[in-house]
Amino acid sequence: MKSENYFVKKANQRKLNRFVEDRYLSFASGASAFLGAACVALSYDMKTKSFGMVPLVVAGLFLGEAALAFLIWTAFKSQVLKSGEVSGGLRLSGIVLAASIINGNIFCGLAGLILLKKNKNLEYQVGCYMLLVEILIIIVSYLNVFKEYVCDSFFIGMGVLAAVILIHGVSLPLVASRVHGNKADKIMFPVALVLIATTLTGNLFSLLLGLMLLRKCYTKEDHVSIAWIDVVKRLFRSQMAVLGAFVIVFLLTMSICANLTFDYGIAIDNNYSLILREPSLAYPFGTDDYGRCVFTRVVFGARISLTVGIMSTTLSIVVGIILGAIAGFYSGSTDNIIMRILDVFMAIPGLLLPIAIIAAFGTNTANITFALGVGAIPSYARTIRASVLTLSDAEFVEAARACGARDKVIIFKHILPNSMAPLIIRATLGIGAGVTAVSSLSYLGLGIAPQIPEWGNILKAGSSYLETNAYMAIFPGFAIVLLVLAFNFLGDGLRDALDPKLK
């Protein structure tokens, strides 16, 4: 009997696995409930021993949406297990779920969009994430209207965001109906170009979707798979990996669009009439001990953290690839010299090397980027060296040598393209480590100047008010954790997507 129940459960699970809506609805229900519980916890004021009204209202919305998502999910499972199909009426309930994006619930909003469409291709899923990023950006930017004044370019910025949302909203049904398998109608070519142009806002999902459409517009044989699109398809099977990518793209887009919709002066100018204000609609994260808006400082701080993390990782990757490829390809004394020099750098513990470089050349963004990049070079060089050593004796390399190819052609055209998978995975994790490192240096007073909005600086200022105004440290700390986790989730997803054993 127990064995029979086990096989029935496995059979039912296989039925549900045929529908991507199952995992989206289950995740939306759990994540919304977690957000609601978090809002309840944040609404409690340690000083007055009472709960704030606004956070409780938001918590109620999240918990209500979690219950709605759970009910829809339950009905969805019941219909799938009974008939193997989902009724049109249940799919229309996705409209109600999709509307929850208005209060910032991206999980239910995404689940609603996925539920609405019966036959979903990969492009439709990418388009949903693309649209939700812009909607969430305009909602966050709209919070500025509750302040005493907005920046001069606020309405221009909101107009640009609204236009981008309109473009993405119109392109979504076109993507769902005009893309079939590995081919797309020629009408999607101008749509792809427009989507790529909207990447100027920082929305990398629109870039990805545009490139996918361009590639499929010129595919002649539908049955031939497209390697990099297959990698994206496998990546989208991991809910956490795509969620990590969403967080990264959202913060990148927010840091770019903030130039139009946020006033930088509110983040850096002292306003002693607003000192230590509690979180409110005007100041969602409260104000600090100088009267500066913590929310605005966190938004602009994302720019520095992402810039330093990405640029330092790029520096270490470029230099690491060159050194690792030369060491692995030529081996012998060349390999020995390069690796022993890198061993010296690896022997210096943790942040000591960046601290020494910053102490010698001064504290600014360029020096911090250089210091963190130099410190990470040995790990990337060793990763590439190991891959090059493995591939140096491969048959395709021997064939290239037999055809008279030069060493640099063999290295950069034949060996390195086949060594990029572990490097890409390590790079995503390295950016997260870079974000943590720059925040740590700023917290120690060795990084970005204290008056400049950077997450480590904001966290350091808030650490002095943990008992009275804990929000000053909670929100920047949460931003650091969220971004690092996002890169870790994305790295794990890429590892699985690039693993040939899991295809």
Image (spheres, rainbow, N blue to C red):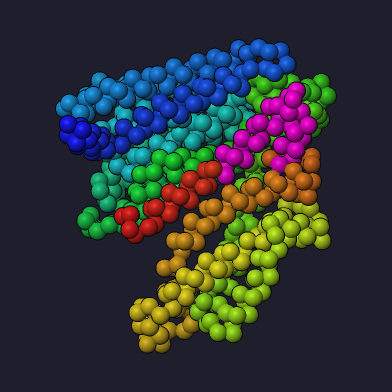
Percent position of residue 92, x then y:
29, 22
- At x 27% / y 57%, what residue is drawn? 225
- At x 43% / y 74%, what residue is drawn? 390
Percent position of residue 209, x then y:
40, 46
Which quadrant would the C terminus be assigned to in this image?
Answer: bottom left
Position of residue 170 relative to residue 485, above or below, is above
Residue 186 vs residue 460, the one in the foreground: 460
Position of residue 500 relative to residue 459, above or below, is below
Percent position of residue 403, x then y:
37, 86
Q: Magenta stretch containing residue 464, yes or no?
A: yes
Percent position of residue 387, x then y:
46, 70
On the question of residue 50 being in view, the answer is yes
Q: Is residue 466 left or right of residue 212?
A: right
**Magenta span: helix, strand or loop, mainly?**
helix
Which quadrant would the N terminus be assigned to in this image?
Answer: top left
Residue 17 vs residue 314, the one in the foreground: 17
Magenta region, residue range: 456-484
Q: Magenta stretch containing residue 499, yes or no?
A: no
Q: Is residue 84 left or right of residue 246?
A: left
Q: Report the residue that reaches farthest toward the front.
A: 1
Residue 97 vs residue 337, the one in the foreground: 337
- Label tally: 0
- At x 59% / y 29%, what residue is drawn? 141
Position of residue 128 relative to residue 440, above or below, is above
Q: Is residue 162 left or right of residue 287?
A: left
- At x 42% / y 22%, what residue is drawn? 66
